[in-house]
Image (cartoon, rainbow, N blue to C red):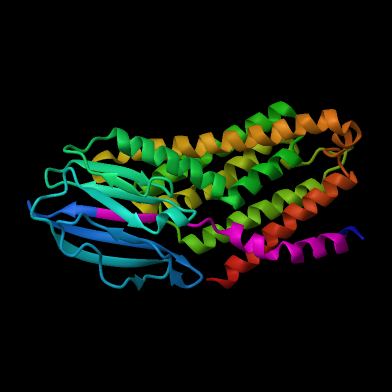
Amino acid sequence: MTKRLLLALLLVLLPAIQAFGHALEPGFADIRQLTSQTWQVFWRKPDVAGQPMTIALQLPDNCTPQTGPEPLFDGSAWISVWVADCPEGLAGSRVFIEGLSSQRTDVLLRLQMQSGATDTIRLTPDQPGHRIPEQAGGWGIFGSYLALGFEHILEGWDHLLFVFALLVLIRDFWRLVGAITAFTVAHSITLALAALGHLSAPGPPVEAIIALSIVFLAVEALKSNAGDIRLSERYPWLIAFAFGLLHGLGFAGALREIGLPEQDIATALLAFNLGVEAGQLAFVGVVLTAATALRFTLPRLATHWRSPGDITTTVVSYGIGSVATFWFVERILSF
């Protein structure tokens, strides 16, 4: 009965699972000064069901052309590259993303001056435009990449499901703290190495193994029983560290799509990683708060839901495993 119920639920939620399996990547615009009057523009729009997202980069009125040619698909996004002539420069002018206000994603705007100064600005549906100051600074880079890391982890449903599976599997508080710490350290290491070019791995296999790591935790939670503490429960930090290395490569893939500013690589990398950690801690805080509220509102359910072999734990574990298995198959088929 439980398996039939889970299968029916999975079929109902299938469209949502497909949407959540891959977070929508942000758009990216790189405007690089070539001479006092000319700028090279690289414009990357996210792919939406095989078509470019309906957003457009608009340069200031004094630039020719203001928009680029029709984008070309590079396998993951839609790319336009052109050179704009801006006789009066860009300082004090406004760059605008047309159509962004009706979307659910952001655009990262990177300005690279001829002097070498670099500035990075995060444009959102609420603030789709940016007035370029006389001088670019590094604080904008830190704030933009911090917000980008925070949003990436909160939109990365596979990473969050892994953390949630840890919460279901590990019942001892201090072992849970150790596991989450190990996961954090591990993905910070591979994120830094990959972003700096010292480590490389193809994205699709990494994403598939990330889904498989969630299946592993779900199976471990199902096999857990009160009389026998499994290796994954006795040394959860070891499991979390090993899989954290893979999840770090997943984070690095998203960061690689956006790019790092050449003059402030360390600042951007630190800010992105801090944003990821802040988002992860926020998620854990929400789950633990919900569990505490459940303990007061439904005390009998709260007492048994994390007990080995309990029907609630079984249903939750099957749910986690079903979603992760779907993602795994989907990502294998997309190779």
Residue 12 in picture, x, y percent from top left: 75, 64
Q: Is residue 274 visible?
A: yes
Relative image position of residue 131 (x, y in whole percent): 25, 43
Report the magenta residues as a range. 3-30
Q: Considering only vertical position in the picture, is 146 above or below 23?
A: above
Q: Is residue 185 above or below residue 333?
A: above
Q: Indicate the position of residue 133 as horizontal and vertical percent values.
A: 20, 39
Q: Residue at x 72, y 61 (%)?
A: 13
Residue drawn at x 64%, y 67% is 329
Image: 262 above or below 325: above
121 and 261: which is toward the camera = 121
User: Is residue 245 on the magenta stretch?
Assistant: no
Percent across and percent down for residue 121 are: 32, 43
- 24 shown above or below 166: below
Horizontally, residue 125 falls left or right of residue 28, namely right
- Give the dominant element type of the magenta stretch: helix, strand or loop: helix
